[in-house]
Image: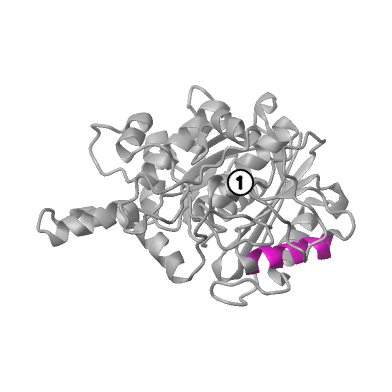
Amino acid sequence: MQPGVVVTGIGIVSAIGIGTEETLTSLLNKRSGIAPVRWLETIHSGIPVAEVSHSTDELAEIAGTSGQPGIFTRNTLLAMIAAGQSVEMSEPSGSGLDQAGLVMATTVGGMDYNEKHYRSLLAGKETAGGTSVLDSSDTTEKLAARFGILRNVTTISTACSSSANAIMLASRLIRNGKLTRVLAGGSDALTIFTLNGFRGLELLSPTGCRPFDAHRDGLTLGEGAAVLMLESDRTADMSKALCRISGYANVNEAFHQTSASPDGAGAFMAMSECLESAGLEPWEIGYINAHGTGTEMNDRAEALAIERLFGRKIPPVSSTKAFTGHTLGAAGAIEAVISVLAIREQKVWPSIHINEVMPEISFLPPNDTLSVPVGHVMSNSFGFGGNNTSLIFSEI
Protein backbone atom coordinates (compact mmCIF):
# COMPACT_ATOMS: atom_id res chain seq x y z
CA MET A 1 0.00 0.00 0.00
CA GLN A 2 1.28 3.48 -0.87
CA PRO A 3 2.01 5.93 1.95
CA GLY A 4 -0.53 8.65 2.58
CA VAL A 5 0.21 12.37 2.46
CA VAL A 6 -0.39 14.66 5.42
CA VAL A 7 -0.02 18.42 5.83
CA THR A 8 2.11 19.30 8.86
CA GLY A 9 2.78 22.98 8.21
CA ILE A 10 1.16 25.89 6.41
CA GLY A 11 2.31 29.42 5.66
CA ILE A 12 0.48 32.22 3.87
CA VAL A 13 0.97 35.83 2.82
CA SER A 14 -1.74 37.70 0.97
CA ALA A 15 -3.69 40.93 0.88
CA ILE A 16 -5.71 39.76 3.91
CA GLY A 17 -2.73 39.15 6.16
CA ILE A 18 0.61 37.59 6.93
CA GLY A 19 0.24 34.22 8.61
CA THR A 20 -2.73 32.05 9.43
CA GLU A 21 -4.04 34.12 12.34
CA GLU A 22 -4.29 37.37 10.37
CA THR A 23 -5.84 35.40 7.50
CA LEU A 24 -8.41 33.81 9.80
CA THR A 25 -9.32 37.18 11.31
CA SER A 26 -9.96 38.62 7.86
CA LEU A 27 -12.04 35.63 6.75
CA LEU A 28 -14.15 35.63 9.91
CA ASN A 29 -14.72 39.39 9.71
CA LYS A 30 -15.38 39.40 5.94
CA ARG A 31 -12.47 41.81 5.49
CA SER A 32 -11.42 41.95 1.84
CA GLY A 33 -7.91 42.89 0.74
CA ILE A 34 -9.11 44.51 -2.47
CA ALA A 35 -8.25 48.22 -2.53
CA PRO A 36 -6.75 50.95 -4.74
CA VAL A 37 -3.17 50.46 -5.94
CA ARG A 38 -0.61 51.32 -3.26
CA TRP A 39 2.78 49.86 -4.14
CA LEU A 40 2.69 49.04 -7.87
CA GLU A 41 4.03 51.85 -10.04
CA THR A 42 1.35 51.97 -12.73
CA ILE A 43 -0.60 54.61 -14.62
CA HIS A 44 -3.71 52.48 -14.09
CA SER A 45 -4.07 53.45 -10.46
CA GLY A 46 -7.87 53.45 -10.69
CA ILE A 47 -8.02 49.67 -11.14
CA PRO A 48 -8.53 47.91 -7.77
CA VAL A 49 -6.00 45.22 -6.81
CA ALA A 50 -5.26 43.02 -3.82
CA GLU A 51 -1.74 43.92 -2.70
CA VAL A 52 0.14 42.65 0.32
CA SER A 53 0.10 45.57 2.75
CA HIS A 54 3.89 45.94 3.02
CA SER A 55 6.48 47.56 0.79
CA THR A 56 9.22 45.43 -0.70
CA ASP A 57 11.71 46.87 1.79
CA GLU A 58 9.41 45.96 4.66
CA LEU A 59 9.03 42.44 3.30
CA ALA A 60 12.82 42.14 3.17
CA GLU A 61 12.95 43.00 6.88
CA ILE A 62 10.30 40.39 7.67
CA ALA A 63 12.05 37.77 5.52
CA GLY A 64 15.43 38.56 7.09
CA THR A 65 17.20 39.33 3.82
CA SER A 66 18.00 43.01 4.42
CA GLY A 67 21.71 43.57 3.98
CA GLN A 68 22.31 40.09 2.56
CA PRO A 69 24.19 39.76 -0.76
CA GLY A 70 22.18 38.99 -3.86
CA ILE A 71 18.89 40.16 -5.34
CA PHE A 72 15.67 39.20 -3.58
CA THR A 73 12.63 40.02 -5.68
CA ARG A 74 9.24 40.77 -4.14
CA ASN A 75 8.13 37.41 -5.45
CA THR A 76 10.96 35.65 -3.60
CA LEU A 77 10.38 37.59 -0.39
CA LEU A 78 6.72 36.60 -0.31
CA ALA A 79 7.70 32.95 -0.79
CA MET A 80 10.40 33.09 1.90
CA ILE A 81 8.00 34.47 4.48
CA ALA A 82 5.32 31.86 3.75
CA ALA A 83 7.84 29.01 3.62
CA GLY A 84 9.35 30.09 6.92
CA GLN A 85 5.95 29.92 8.60
CA SER A 86 5.33 26.43 7.19
CA VAL A 87 8.72 25.08 8.25
CA GLU A 88 8.37 26.55 11.73
CA MET A 89 4.91 25.05 12.19
CA SER A 90 5.96 21.59 11.07
CA GLU A 91 9.33 21.50 12.77
CA PRO A 92 10.45 24.54 14.82
CA SER A 93 14.12 23.54 14.72
CA GLY A 94 14.10 23.55 10.91
CA SER A 95 16.41 20.53 10.87
CA GLY A 96 16.23 17.56 8.55
CA LEU A 97 15.32 19.45 5.39
CA ASP A 98 18.46 18.35 3.53
CA GLN A 99 16.56 15.17 2.63
CA ALA A 100 13.33 17.02 1.75
CA GLY A 101 12.10 18.10 -1.66
CA LEU A 102 10.91 21.48 -2.86
CA VAL A 103 8.26 22.14 -5.52
CA MET A 104 7.39 25.79 -6.09
CA ALA A 105 5.23 27.56 -8.65
CA THR A 106 4.95 31.00 -10.19
CA THR A 107 3.78 32.72 -13.36
CA VAL A 108 5.83 35.94 -13.34
CA GLY A 109 9.08 34.89 -11.68
CA GLY A 110 11.22 37.95 -10.92
CA MET A 111 9.40 40.27 -13.28
CA ASP A 112 8.56 42.65 -10.43
CA TYR A 113 12.27 43.44 -10.09
CA ASN A 114 13.03 43.43 -13.80
CA GLU A 115 10.36 45.99 -14.64
CA LYS A 116 12.19 48.49 -12.44
CA HIS A 117 15.60 47.27 -13.57
CA TYR A 118 14.65 47.72 -17.23
CA ARG A 119 13.73 51.37 -16.71
CA SER A 120 17.06 51.96 -14.93
CA LEU A 121 18.90 50.17 -17.71
CA LEU A 122 17.33 52.40 -20.34
CA ALA A 123 18.38 55.42 -18.33
CA GLY A 124 21.96 54.16 -18.28
CA LYS A 125 22.01 53.68 -14.50
CA GLU A 126 22.57 49.93 -14.30
CA THR A 127 24.22 47.04 -16.09
CA ALA A 128 22.31 44.01 -17.30
CA GLY A 129 23.39 41.79 -14.38
CA GLY A 130 19.97 41.77 -12.69
CA THR A 131 18.19 39.95 -15.49
CA SER A 132 19.08 36.55 -13.97
CA VAL A 133 16.34 36.87 -11.35
CA LEU A 134 13.64 36.97 -14.04
CA ASP A 135 13.82 33.19 -14.32
CA SER A 136 10.89 31.40 -12.66
CA SER A 137 13.31 29.11 -10.82
CA ASP A 138 15.07 32.01 -9.06
CA THR A 139 12.65 31.94 -6.13
CA THR A 140 12.85 28.15 -5.88
CA GLU A 141 16.63 28.13 -5.84
CA LYS A 142 16.78 30.81 -3.16
CA LEU A 143 14.31 28.89 -1.00
CA ALA A 144 16.36 25.71 -1.42
CA ALA A 145 19.47 27.61 -0.30
CA ARG A 146 17.66 29.22 2.65
CA PHE A 147 16.36 25.92 4.04
CA GLY A 148 19.18 23.62 2.95
CA ILE A 149 17.01 21.49 0.67
CA LEU A 150 19.24 19.22 -1.40
CA ARG A 151 16.94 16.64 -3.02
CA ASN A 152 14.31 17.17 -5.71
CA VAL A 153 14.04 20.93 -6.45
CA THR A 154 11.43 21.79 -9.09
CA THR A 155 9.58 24.81 -10.46
CA ILE A 156 6.16 24.63 -12.11
CA SER A 157 4.43 27.25 -14.26
CA THR A 158 1.03 26.26 -15.61
CA ALA A 159 -0.81 29.58 -15.33
CA CYS A 160 -3.44 29.78 -12.60
CA SER A 161 -3.22 26.08 -11.68
CA SER A 162 0.54 26.31 -11.07
CA SER A 163 0.73 25.92 -7.30
CA ALA A 164 -2.12 23.42 -7.17
CA ASN A 165 0.00 21.34 -9.56
CA ALA A 166 3.01 21.89 -7.29
CA ILE A 167 1.04 20.40 -4.40
CA MET A 168 -0.12 17.53 -6.60
CA LEU A 169 3.43 16.74 -7.78
CA ALA A 170 4.75 16.89 -4.22
CA SER A 171 2.00 14.50 -3.12
CA ARG A 172 2.87 12.08 -5.91
CA LEU A 173 6.55 12.13 -4.97
CA ILE A 174 5.59 11.11 -1.44
CA ARG A 175 2.98 8.53 -2.41
CA ASN A 176 5.41 6.87 -4.82
CA GLY A 177 8.12 6.62 -2.18
CA LYS A 178 10.55 9.08 -3.76
CA LEU A 179 10.58 11.46 -0.79
CA THR A 180 9.11 11.59 2.71
CA ARG A 181 8.94 15.40 3.08
CA VAL A 182 8.26 18.04 0.44
CA LEU A 183 7.80 21.78 0.80
CA ALA A 184 5.28 22.81 -1.87
CA GLY A 185 3.48 26.00 -2.85
CA GLY A 186 3.65 29.08 -5.01
CA SER A 187 4.17 32.81 -5.09
CA ASP A 188 3.36 35.67 -7.44
CA ALA A 189 3.96 39.37 -6.99
CA LEU A 190 1.79 41.92 -8.70
CA THR A 191 3.48 43.35 -11.81
CA ILE A 192 2.83 45.93 -14.49
CA PHE A 193 3.00 43.15 -17.05
CA THR A 194 0.16 41.14 -15.51
CA LEU A 195 -2.00 44.20 -14.84
CA ASN A 196 -1.58 45.43 -18.41
CA GLY A 197 -2.03 41.95 -19.82
CA PHE A 198 -5.34 41.25 -18.10
CA ARG A 199 -6.47 44.78 -18.87
CA GLY A 200 -5.73 44.09 -22.54
CA LEU A 201 -7.88 40.96 -22.32
CA GLU A 202 -10.66 43.13 -20.84
CA LEU A 203 -10.95 40.79 -17.86
CA LEU A 204 -10.40 43.23 -14.98
CA SER A 205 -13.27 44.46 -12.83
CA PRO A 206 -13.36 48.24 -12.43
CA THR A 207 -14.82 47.91 -8.92
CA GLY A 208 -13.55 44.61 -7.47
CA CYS A 209 -14.41 41.01 -8.27
CA ARG A 210 -17.76 39.48 -7.29
CA PRO A 211 -17.60 35.74 -7.97
CA PHE A 212 -20.98 34.15 -8.71
CA ASP A 213 -22.79 37.50 -8.66
CA ALA A 214 -25.33 38.09 -11.41
CA HIS A 215 -23.62 41.36 -12.32
CA ARG A 216 -20.00 40.23 -12.01
CA ASP A 217 -17.76 42.21 -14.32
CA GLY A 218 -14.31 40.66 -14.14
CA LEU A 219 -11.50 39.52 -11.91
CA THR A 220 -9.23 41.42 -9.52
CA LEU A 221 -5.51 40.70 -9.58
CA GLY A 222 -3.79 39.99 -6.29
CA GLU A 223 -0.40 38.90 -5.01
CA GLY A 224 0.88 36.61 -2.32
CA ALA A 225 2.39 33.26 -1.49
CA ALA A 226 1.50 30.08 0.34
CA VAL A 227 3.62 27.05 1.16
CA LEU A 228 2.62 23.71 2.70
CA MET A 229 4.84 21.10 4.32
CA LEU A 230 3.73 17.70 3.06
CA GLU A 231 4.94 14.49 4.69
CA SER A 232 4.46 10.75 4.44
CA ASP A 233 2.11 9.46 7.09
CA ARG A 234 4.63 6.67 7.70
CA THR A 235 7.35 9.00 8.93
CA ALA A 236 5.54 12.19 10.02
CA ASP A 237 4.86 13.19 13.61
CA MET A 238 1.11 12.66 13.27
CA SER A 239 0.44 14.87 16.30
CA LYS A 240 1.35 17.79 14.01
CA ALA A 241 -0.76 16.65 11.07
CA LEU A 242 -3.43 19.18 10.14
CA CYS A 243 -5.15 17.09 7.47
CA ARG A 244 -4.56 14.63 4.64
CA ILE A 245 -4.28 15.25 0.92
CA SER A 246 -6.61 12.48 -0.17
CA GLY A 247 -7.19 13.31 -3.83
CA TYR A 248 -5.83 15.24 -6.78
CA ALA A 249 -6.28 15.42 -10.53
CA ASN A 250 -5.03 17.51 -13.44
CA VAL A 251 -6.62 17.57 -16.88
CA ASN A 252 -6.22 19.73 -19.95
CA GLU A 253 -9.32 20.36 -22.01
CA ALA A 254 -7.39 22.46 -24.60
CA PHE A 255 -10.55 24.34 -25.53
CA HIS A 256 -9.10 27.86 -25.85
CA GLN A 257 -5.97 29.80 -24.91
CA THR A 258 -7.70 31.85 -22.20
CA SER A 259 -11.31 30.70 -21.92
CA ALA A 260 -12.93 27.68 -20.33
CA SER A 261 -15.32 25.54 -22.35
CA PRO A 262 -18.83 26.99 -21.94
CA ASP A 263 -20.26 23.71 -20.64
CA GLY A 264 -17.56 23.34 -17.98
CA ALA A 265 -16.20 20.10 -19.44
CA GLY A 266 -12.66 20.67 -18.16
CA ALA A 267 -13.79 21.57 -14.66
CA PHE A 268 -16.04 18.52 -14.57
CA MET A 269 -13.22 16.21 -15.59
CA ALA A 270 -10.83 17.63 -13.00
CA MET A 271 -13.33 17.38 -10.15
CA SER A 272 -14.63 13.92 -11.07
CA GLU A 273 -11.14 12.45 -11.50
CA CYS A 274 -10.09 14.04 -8.21
CA LEU A 275 -13.00 12.35 -6.43
CA GLU A 276 -12.07 9.04 -8.02
CA SER A 277 -8.44 9.35 -6.90
CA ALA A 278 -9.64 9.98 -3.33
CA GLY A 279 -12.12 7.10 -3.39
CA LEU A 280 -14.91 9.48 -2.42
CA GLU A 281 -18.48 9.99 -3.56
CA PRO A 282 -19.69 13.53 -4.39
CA TRP A 283 -21.97 13.66 -1.36
CA GLU A 284 -18.97 13.20 0.96
CA ILE A 285 -17.47 16.60 0.07
CA GLY A 286 -18.33 19.14 2.78
CA TYR A 287 -17.13 22.31 1.06
CA ILE A 288 -15.95 23.41 -2.38
CA ASN A 289 -13.45 26.27 -2.50
CA ALA A 290 -14.22 27.26 -6.07
CA HIS A 291 -11.83 28.74 -8.60
CA GLY A 292 -14.45 31.51 -8.88
CA THR A 293 -12.63 34.38 -10.59
CA GLY A 294 -15.58 36.69 -11.09
CA THR A 295 -15.50 36.61 -14.88
CA GLU A 296 -18.72 35.90 -16.72
CA MET A 297 -17.57 32.78 -18.57
CA ASN A 298 -15.44 31.08 -15.90
CA ASP A 299 -17.99 31.34 -13.09
CA ARG A 300 -20.74 29.99 -15.30
CA ALA A 301 -18.63 27.10 -16.59
CA GLU A 302 -17.49 26.07 -13.11
CA ALA A 303 -21.03 26.34 -11.73
CA LEU A 304 -22.38 24.13 -14.53
CA ALA A 305 -19.68 21.55 -13.83
CA ILE A 306 -20.49 21.54 -10.11
CA GLU A 307 -24.19 21.05 -10.80
CA ARG A 308 -23.46 18.24 -13.28
CA LEU A 309 -21.19 16.39 -10.85
CA PHE A 310 -23.00 16.93 -7.55
CA GLY A 311 -26.59 16.94 -8.79
CA ARG A 312 -29.09 17.82 -6.07
CA LYS A 313 -26.60 17.34 -3.22
CA ILE A 314 -24.31 20.31 -3.82
CA PRO A 315 -22.18 21.15 -0.76
CA PRO A 316 -21.53 24.78 0.23
CA VAL A 317 -19.60 26.53 -2.54
CA SER A 318 -17.69 29.80 -2.17
CA SER A 319 -14.84 31.69 -3.78
CA THR A 320 -12.30 33.37 -1.52
CA LYS A 321 -10.88 35.44 -4.40
CA ALA A 322 -13.17 38.26 -3.30
CA PHE A 323 -10.85 38.39 -0.25
CA THR A 324 -7.42 37.80 -1.79
CA GLY A 325 -7.90 38.70 -5.44
CA HIS A 326 -6.67 36.30 -8.11
CA THR A 327 -3.06 35.60 -7.21
CA LEU A 328 -2.39 33.64 -10.42
CA GLY A 329 0.45 31.15 -9.80
CA ALA A 330 -0.01 31.43 -6.04
CA ALA A 331 -3.80 30.98 -6.10
CA GLY A 332 -3.87 27.19 -5.79
CA ALA A 333 -1.56 27.20 -2.76
CA ILE A 334 -3.26 30.17 -1.06
CA GLU A 335 -6.64 28.49 -1.47
CA ALA A 336 -5.13 25.18 -0.32
CA VAL A 337 -4.10 26.83 2.95
CA ILE A 338 -7.55 28.40 3.26
CA SER A 339 -9.03 24.93 2.68
CA VAL A 340 -6.81 23.45 5.41
CA LEU A 341 -8.03 26.22 7.73
CA ALA A 342 -11.62 25.30 6.87
CA ILE A 343 -10.96 21.78 8.12
CA ARG A 344 -9.03 22.93 11.18
CA GLU A 345 -11.70 25.44 12.18
CA GLN A 346 -14.68 23.42 10.85
CA LYS A 347 -15.85 26.45 8.89
CA VAL A 348 -17.08 27.23 5.40
CA TRP A 349 -15.82 30.63 4.28
CA PRO A 350 -18.25 33.12 2.75
CA SER A 351 -18.48 34.43 -0.80
CA ILE A 352 -18.48 38.16 -0.17
CA HIS A 353 -19.56 40.98 -2.49
CA ILE A 354 -22.54 39.03 -3.87
CA ASN A 355 -25.60 41.25 -4.19
CA GLU A 356 -27.60 38.97 -6.46
CA VAL A 357 -26.65 35.35 -7.20
CA MET A 358 -26.27 34.27 -10.81
CA PRO A 359 -29.71 33.26 -12.05
CA GLU A 360 -28.29 30.32 -14.04
CA ILE A 361 -27.27 28.30 -10.96
CA SER A 362 -29.24 26.36 -8.38
CA PHE A 363 -26.92 26.73 -5.39
CA LEU A 364 -26.49 29.76 -3.14
CA PRO A 365 -22.94 30.63 -2.07
CA PRO A 366 -23.02 31.55 1.64
CA ASN A 367 -22.89 35.24 2.56
CA ASP A 368 -21.51 34.51 6.03
CA THR A 369 -19.16 31.99 7.60
CA LEU A 370 -20.87 28.67 8.24
CA SER A 371 -20.01 26.53 11.24
CA VAL A 372 -20.70 23.06 9.88
CA PRO A 373 -18.90 19.67 9.83
CA VAL A 374 -16.17 19.85 7.19
CA GLY A 375 -14.56 16.46 6.61
CA HIS A 376 -13.44 16.89 3.01
CA VAL A 377 -12.73 20.10 1.08
CA MET A 378 -12.35 20.26 -2.69
CA SER A 379 -10.23 23.16 -3.95
CA ASN A 380 -10.35 24.07 -7.64
CA SER A 381 -7.69 25.88 -9.68
CA PHE A 382 -8.38 26.31 -13.38
CA GLY A 383 -5.77 27.93 -15.62
CA PHE A 384 -5.32 29.40 -19.07
CA GLY A 385 -4.99 26.83 -21.82
CA GLY A 386 -7.49 24.61 -20.02
CA ASN A 387 -4.98 23.35 -17.43
CA ASN A 388 -7.41 22.40 -14.68
CA THR A 389 -6.56 20.97 -11.26
CA SER A 390 -8.63 19.89 -8.29
CA LEU A 391 -7.34 18.89 -4.86
CA ILE A 392 -9.13 17.27 -1.92
CA PHE A 393 -8.08 17.88 1.68
CA SER A 394 -9.50 15.56 4.34
CA GLU A 395 -9.55 15.62 8.13
CA ILE A 396 -7.36 13.10 9.95
Name, please, the residue furthest toward the bottom. 255
Q: Give the range drawn in magenta.
A: 297-309
> Farthest residue in the left direction?
124
Q: Can residue 29 be seen in this view?
A: yes
- The image shows residue 39 at horizontal and vertical percentages of 34, 45
Residue 372: in magenta span:
no
Where 172 sits versus 180, above or below?
A: below
Q: Residue furthest right?
A: 312
Query: Which residue is at a point 42% across and 38% down the rendered structure image?
Result: 53
Tell me what residue is drawn at x 45 percent, y 58 percent.
107
| Residue placed under numbered mark 1 in the picture | 335
In this view, the residue in front, 305 or 249, is 305
**Residue 262: percent from left, percent from top:** 69, 74
Determine whether 182 is above or below 203 in the image: above
Q: Is the magenta stretch mostly helix, strand or loop?
A: helix
Q: Which of 329 and 396 is in front in this view?
A: 329
Is residue 128 at all visible to an observer of this figure? no
Count the labels in the image.
Answer: 1
Q: What residue type is labelled 1?
A: Glu
Secondary element at image label 1: helix
Tell me: residue 263, above or below residue 366. Answer: below
Residue 251 left/right relative to 333: right
Q: Which of 12 and 8 is in front in this view?
A: 12
Q: Position of residue 143 (x, y in %)?
A: 40, 41
Position of residue 290 in the picture relative to residue 56 (left or right): right
> Is 215 displayed left or right of 19 in the figure?
right
Query: Quick check: is 298 in the magenta stretch?
Result: yes
Q: In which quarter of the image is the C terminus?
A: top right
Q: Quadrant of residue 131?
A: bottom left
For image coordinates 51% across by 42% down, the residue present is 33
Horizontally, is 371 left or right of 33 in the view? right
